[in-house]
Image (cartoon, coloured by chain):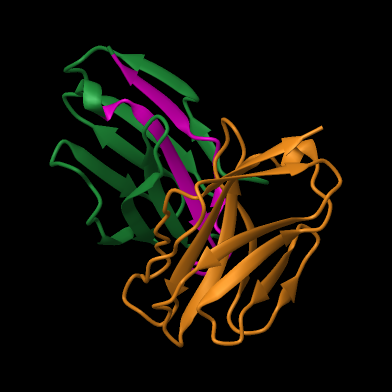
Amino acid sequence: DAKTTQPNSMESNEEEPVHLPCNHSTISGTDYIHWYRQLPSQGPEYVIHGLTSNVNNRMASLAIAEDRKSSTLILHRATLRDAAVYYCILHNAGGTSYGKLTFGQGTILTVHP
Amino acid sequence: GAGVSQSPSNKVTEKGKDVELRCDPISGHTALYWYRQSLGQGLEFLIYFQGNSAPDKSGLPSDRFSAERTGGSVSTLTIQRTQQEDSAVYLCASSHRGGYGYTFGSGTRLTVV
């Protein structure tokens, strides 16, 4: 799976929007962009995924650049419970890696009250 | 069950002993994955099951590690002759369709003393 680049850490204030960037300049046409997050002492949890169009769900929004070389996870109003490590992952559904997701180091999000 | 269940949640073992870690995936999920996470590190893929077969064992770090899955459901990860470097959180995830919306368990924290 292609590599992604994320900032090591970001900070936000409670109830403010948070934009978490991810660069993936070597993305291929069949790579999906997945976001997971890991709260302290828990396993990762699925947040959102997309291919080309922007996506919205109850947790977050995913904005994908027109050239697909970058994307942004948007938390519309951060809460203290959103403090976690956020992972941006590319997965080629048509490849031989089956469902295996390769996790990088992620972005540590700190939310201040 | 409602989620992925892992047992035990914590395991302390003496160096050289064998350990078995169990994962109960979400009912009906055909894909099952084992990862491990050392302290402060990202997730390291170990093995992937589709049904009872393991088409991808590439992440198992040594022949001391083995895993099986029976009945397309429960999986057991066995570590023989444990070493201190095996200390980590072992995470299991399951998926209905590989790569889309993994659900992770809370993990087993293994400490080898």
- From the top left corner, tell me how far across and down residue A13 is, in percent: 79, 41
Which residue is found at the position 38% from the left and 66% from the top? A3
Which residue is found at the position 62% from the left and 41% from the top? A84
In the rendered structure, does residue B88 fall within the stretch colored magenta?
yes
The quadrant where residue B56 appears: bottom left
The chain letter corresponding to orange is A
The quadrant where residue B76 appears: top left
Q: Is residue A4 left or right of residue B46?
A: right
- From the top left corner, tell me how far across and down residue B112 is, in percent: 28, 17
Q: Is residue A53 left or right of residue A8?
A: right
Q: Nearer the viewer, residue B1 or B103?
A: B103
Q: Is residue A24 above or below residue A29?
A: above
Q: Residue furthest right?
A: A15
Q: Nearer the viewer, residue B9 or A39?
A: A39
Tally of numbered discs: 0
The chain letter corresponding to green is B
- In the rendered image, is residue B71 in sight? no
In the rendered structure, does residue B65 fall within the stretch colored magenta?
no
- From the top left corner, tell me how far across and down residue A20 is, in percent: 63, 58
Which residue is found at the position 39% from the left and 78% from the top? A26
Q: Is residue A99 above or below residue A13?
A: below
- In the rendered image, is residue B103 in sight? yes
The quadrant where residue B42 appears: top left
Q: Is residue A88 left or right of residue A52?
A: left
Quarter of the picture containing the C terminus of chain A is top right
- From the top left corner, tell me how far across and down residue B12 is, in percent: 36, 14
Q: Nearer the viewer, residue B39 or A25?
A: A25
Q: Nearer the viewer, residue B8 or B107?
A: B107
Magenta segment: B86-112
